[in-house]
Image: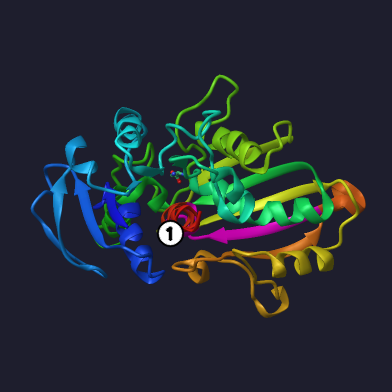
Amino acid sequence: MRVGIVGATGAVGRELVDVLGRRAFPVSSLRLFASARSAGMKTTTPFGETEIEEFSDAKMRDLDLALLAVSGDFAKAHAPRMVEAGVTVVDNSSAFRLQDNVPLVVPEVNASAIGAHRLIANPNCTTAILVVALEPLRQAFGLRRVIVSTYQAASGAGAEGMAELERETRRVLVDGAKPQHDVFRWPLAFNVIPQIDSFQPNAYTREEMKVVWESRKIMGLPDLPISCTAVRIPTMRVHAEAVTIETERPVTPEAAREVLRRAPGVKVVDDPENGIYPMPLTATGQDDVEAGRIRANPVFGDRGLDIFLCGDQLLKGAALNAVQIAERLKAA
Ligand code: 2RA
């Protein structure tokens, strides 16, 4: 396939190149697009040395598949034109995720939604990590309600977010100075920030509502009661999520562990006595979402479960999921 990555120099764009190579995606030519600032730079990819090109609609016509790692505004402006020109588009932004005629896909959950569509939306990273573990539990025990608290890494705000965290941590430790911030609303070094994205009229943030809206759409449960508190923490990579569920049928930690052990995309990491549980440290660079600390939640009697998840949000939450979607397209 003639593949193009738009937004190739960003945190997700770089992972896309790597994941395509690692999974031996059948790339006949790879073109990397970015802003004029990066155009002309050469980069080594698993498919050979490639020059970054400035994006233009005309150049997209030569592609079979475009993987977009750009803003929602950019995607809205260009993706429909690419599809009209015969290019299949997997979009990582939130521009089309909730549109009825655009499938929002996590292949382990709803690959069949892809059908004959040529514009497919990749979910928000927090959502993808959540549903890959929720769906098998829902199939086994039913889902009555879900409460999620997240601990999200700086790289959720892109390469700039990671750079700011590193710079500010050094400023504090090496220079003894106060952190300064630009990407995040407050200093993230030595802090946690209970705001990701803007506040909505219902007092939740947009990031929190994305988890609600997108999980319902992907799992086909439009009325699922679900709430989320999303918090930015000073880690570089991997989003962690503390998830409480009430199931429809009785559940035990042992049964849940067994279901998750068999679930594609999930790795059970759950031996707390020996200090074995999901952590950003161990989940970084891993394709599977780690699930652990699996225990009965007494608030919901024999139908309650608490789980801790850690997923590399640049991989399952972004690049890996996009490439998995592309693999399904190829297979269709
Ligand atoms: C974040 N989930 O962590 C967002 C990025 N898509 O900021």
Mark 1, ligand 1, within 8 Å: the answer is no
User: Considering depth in this image, is 77 or 315 the residue closer to the camera?
Assistant: 77
Toward which corner of the image does residue 169 lie, by quadrant?
bottom left
Q: Mark 1 highlights which residue? A: 237
Name the residue: 35% across, 29% down: 76
Q: Is residue 191 left or right of residue 248?
A: left
Is residue 1 placed above or below 161 in the rendered structure? Answer: below
In the rendered structure, the answer to whether residue 285 lies left or right of residue 269 reads left
Q: Is residue 14 above or below residue 283?
A: above
Q: Residue at x 86, y 47 (%)?
A: 299
Label 1: how many Cα within 10 Å (few below 14, some 14–19, many 20+) = many
Q: What x and y, as percent, mark residue 19?
A: 38, 64
Which residue range is magenta in the image?
Answer: 305-317
Q: Is residue 203 magenta?
A: no
Q: For residue 20, what is the image quadrant?
A: bottom left
Q: Is residue 163 visible?
A: no
* Residue farthest top in this picture: 201
- Callout 1, which amino acid? Arg
